[in-house]
Amino acid sequence: MHEWQSLSHVRWECKYHVVIIPEYRRKVLYGKIRHRIGRILRELCQQRGVELLEGHCMPDHIHMCLSVPPKYSVAHMMGFLKGKSAVRIHRERLYERRMTGLHFWATRIASIVCGCKQAACASGRGALAFRRRRATGQTGQPGPENT
């Protein structure tokens, strides 16, 4: 069944598959910085009470499955994560390599609400399957085109 979490007046299960990219989609997420960024994002999530269920770091983007409490909007949480992590990355890497100032992340994010299947959410397979069904017109909803 569901593993509901609770605040004072609400029981909730809000999971989001989020993708963030560095500015200009540069392939800078490798080696030591890859591990540092993972550690930084985990620490920032813990500060806000957000659970980082799973994350995958590719050379030019990061996939994360987040469980965000309803008291925060996804946009607010991503603004916090991207802003604070950019400052920390800049401070840690200032003398090693020229970065693009404090603008490490691009201004856009991709966010998809996850269903009940956490494994499909975390790996991104659920989102990809949904996009394929949507592109072919099969939404899985009963309707005139799917009956």
Image: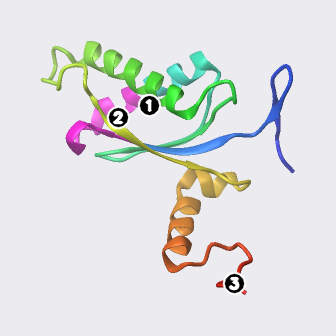
Q: Residue at x 32, y 16 (%)?
A: 87
The residues bearing labels 3 and 2 have C-alpha atoms spaced at a distance of 47 Å
Q: Tags 2 and 1 in contact by the CB under 8 Å rule?
A: yes
Identified by mark 2, the residue type is: Arg
Where is residue 138 shown, x and y percent of the image? Answer: 60, 78
Q: Residues within 10 Å of mark 2 (few under 14, many from 20)?
A: some
In the image: residue 22, left or right of residue 37: left
Secondary structure beneath dot 1 equals helix
Where is residue 2 shown, x and y percent of the image? Answer: 83, 46
Secondary structure beneath dot 3 equals loop
Which residue corresponds to mark 3? 144
Q: Could you say which disc has been placed on residue 38 in the image?
A: 1
Identified by mark 1, the residue type is: Gly
Identified by mark 3, the residue type is: Pro
Q: Quick one: 121 or 92, which is closer to the camera?
A: 121
Tell me where the magenta segment starts and ends, as one range.
20-38
Residue placed furthest toward the left = 98
Which residue corresponds to mark 2? 34
The residues bearing labels 1 and 3 have C-alpha atoms spaced at a distance of 45 Å
Where is residue 100 shown, x and y percent of the image? Answer: 17, 26
Secondary structure beneath dot 2 equals helix
Q: Is residue 39 among the parts visible in the rendering? A: no
